[in-house]
Image (spheres, rainbow, N blue to C red):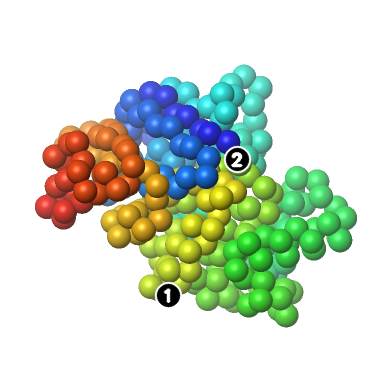
Amino acid sequence: MKRIEATDVSAWFGAHKAIEGISLMFEPKQVTALIGPSGCGKSTFIRTLNRMHEVVPGARFQGSVALDGEDVYGPGVSAADVRRSIGMVFQRPNPFPTMSIRDNVAAGLKLNGMRKKGEIDETVEWALRHTGLWDEVKNRLDRPGAGLSGGQQQRLCIARAIAVQPEVLLMDEPCSALDPVSTLKIEDLITDLKDEYTIVIVTHNMQQAARVSDTTAFFNISEAGQPGRLVESGPTSKIFTKPDDERTEAYITGRFG
C-alpha cells in the first residue's frame, strides 16, 4: 500500500481543458470518494492518476502525481509499470469476452511474465477468493467470463485488477450498471479491500459515498464548458454533515446537480 499525491493537476483533450489545478492526497487503508455533477472532471482526474488518459489521442497533462514520492510521469517511467501499480476498474464490467474466467484473472499475470501453471492457478484462486467469487465459479473456471451475471463480471474485473497486486485501486463508478444486490456486494468488497489497498472511487451515488468512503472530495464546474475544479475535501462525515462550501451542501442535499 502506498500514498498517492496529486499536485496542481490539469488535463486537456485537444483544446478542451477538462480539469484545472487539482491537488489531493490519497492515504493507504482509506477509501476516497470523488463526487460532483456530470461533466466536472471526476473520471478525467482519476485517469490521470495512472496515466490512462494518455490512451485518448490529443490528451495532455500538467502537474504531478507521486506514488510514495516517486513521480509517475517522471523520465523513464513507463505507463505500463504505472498501471501495474495503480490498477483500475471501469464503469461497466469489461471481462475479455473470448477468455475463460480463469484466463481473465490470469491475463495480467501472464503479461507480467508469470509462466508456472501452479503459481498462476494459486494467484487466480487467491484473487477470486478476495472478491468473493471463488465459491460461485470454482467449478466453471473454463467457461467464458462474459457468461457471468453483471455483478459477477464486475467482481471478476476487480479480481483481474488485484491479481497483479497493485498498490492503489481506482474505481470509476463501479456500480452504476449493477442492480442493488450486486451493488451491495461490491460495496462490501470495497470495505474489505481497503485494508490492503489505497482506494479511490468515483460515484454519483451520495448514499454509496457515505457508506464506503473515509474521505470525500467534491468537484464542480463554474459554468458549462469550463474545466472541473476541486471545491473541497475532507472526512466523509464532515463533508456530508457540515461542509465548508455552500456549493458542496447544495449538491449533497440535491438542490443542484
* Residue shown at 60% from the left, 68% from the top: 132
Foreground pick, 70 / 212: 212
Would you identify the image quadrant in which residue 155 lies? Answer: bottom right
Badge 1 amino acid: Val
* Residue shown at 17% from the left, 36% from the top: 245
Foreground pick, 46 / 119: 119
Q: Secondary structure at mark 1?
A: helix
Q: In this image, 109 relative to 29: left or right? A: right
Q: In this image, 154 relative to 145: left or right? A: left
Q: Which residue is mark 2?
A: 1
Q: Position of residue 108 (x, y in %)?
A: 70, 51
Foreground pick, 100 / 13: 100
Q: Position of residue 243 (x, y in %)?
A: 21, 41
Whether label 1 touches label 2, CB < 8 Å: no
* Residue shown at 42% from the left, 75% from the top: 181
Residue 57 appears in the figure: no
Q: Which residue is mark 1?
A: 181
- Report crowding for label 2: few under 14, some 14 to 19, many 20 or more residues within 10 A (C-alpha): many
Q: Viewer-nearest of labels 1 and 2? A: 2
